[in-house]
Each structure stands twice: as structure tokens, then as C-alpha cells.
Amino acid sequence: MEQAESVPITSRRGFLGHIVGAYCAIGAIAGASAVEARDQPDAELLRLWDVFDAHLRLLREEKEQNKPAHSAYDDLVDAVIRNDKSGAPPYEEFFRHPVAVARNAAVNREGGIFDALDDLSNRMREMKAEGFPGLLVKARLVLYDTTGTCLLEGATKSPDPDEDWEVTCARAFLAECERLALLEQKGGARG
């Protein structure tokens, strides 16, 4: 088994992977595929969003597969904190323990996906939206970047009654952008 090096998770990516990943589902907003017109001025922005959305789905799947590794790691950390000699290695050997190695590998796989998401979001942020479909992509990025809320089907509707007010407001804004994007696509948003 390969030995993993101990690396504390102190970055935005690490935070998202551990805190936000525990409560948000990842994917695309309902209706993302409804904005299909790729021959419009925002075509490249929409294409990049499709790639971003695919990475969000991949991340969701990876996080689901990694739940056992994260759970086992949490149990191991608890054993170390309790100084439980029966199940915990000495601190010096902790990061070489198979559970810690497996969890570190899971974090690295998730981190690679977050790196791709960061690259894509940077590229999309540099582009200008030319219409409401592009503005919808920009609004989705704002929600992703500012709240850490990852997007899934139905993201314009809150699945959590205890959701933060800011996220609820952002969802309402996204719903309006989505409505205007679909209206523009049908030829009715600009007059």
C-alpha cells in the first residue's frame, strides 16, 4: 500500500470538501439543459457551463463513494483523541495508518475535481455574458463561489428549511435569471 504524506486541509477547496460537501448536493440547476441554444452569443459560456456541470456531477459521485473513507477517518481521529489504545495508532504513525491513507487519497481525488472546477469557473468569470442565458451562468457561479452551495437539480428551490437567508435569496435570483433566460431563448425577453 502506498504511503501518503500528511497534508492539513486549510484551503478553500479543503473547506468545501469537508464542510460544504456535508450539506450540499452537487449538480446543475433544474432547467440547465433547457437553455439549449448554442448558436447564440453566449454559446461558449454555456458550453463551459456544461463542462462545469459534468465536473459537479463527478464530484457528487466521488463524494458519495468517499463517504466510508471519511467516516472511518473521523472514527480513527476520535479514537486518537480519546487515546483509545485498542483502535488508534500512536500519533507518529497516524498518517501512515491505512484509514488515513485511504482518506487522504479520497481528499486528493476530490481536490483534483475542485481544481478543475476552479479553472473552469475562472475561465467563465473572465467572459462577458451577452444575454440572459449567459447571465444565468454567471449567477450560478456567484452562488457557487460565494456560498459554497453546490448546484443540483431544483437548486432554485431550497431543500433545507433551515438554509441561510443569503442562499435562499440567491436561489430566488437564480430562478428569475432562469425564467428570463428561457424567455429570451423563446424570443420574448428583449423588446
Image (cartoon, rainbow, N blue to C red):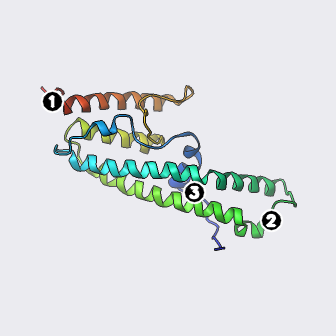
Residue 22: quadrant of the picture:
top right
Front-most of 25 and 166? Answer: 25
Q: Residue at x 37, y 43 (%)?
A: 141
Residue 110 vs residue 8: left or right? left
Q: Quadrant of the N terminus?
A: bottom right
Would you name the residue on which mark 2 appears? 89
Identify the amino acid type marked 2: Pro
Residue 71 vs residue 32: left or right? right
Dot 1 and dot 2 residues touching (CB under 8 Å)? no
Tell me the SS state at disc 2.
loop
Q: Quadrant of the C terminus?
A: top left
- Give neighbour class at mark 3: few <14, some 14-19, many 20+ (Cα, 10 Å): few
Q: At which x and y percent is residue 167?
A: 47, 32
Q: Residue at x 59, y 58 (%)?
A: 9
Would you name the residue on which mark 1 appears? 187
Q: CA distance from mark 1 to mark 2?
A: 65 Å
Would you name the residue on which mark 3 appears? 10
Give whichever of discs 3 and 1 has the lower sequence position.
3
Identify the amino acid type marked 1: Gly
Give whichever of discs 2 and 3 has the lower sequence position.
3
Say which of marks 1 and 2 sits in front.
1
Q: Residue furthest left?
A: 191
Identify the amino acid type marked 3: Thr
Looking at the image, is 149 positioned above or below residue 117? Answer: above
Give whichever of discs 1 and 2 has the lower sequence position.
2
Tell me the SS state at disc 3.
loop
Q: At which x and y percent is residue 169?
A: 43, 28
Front-most of 7 and 180? Answer: 180
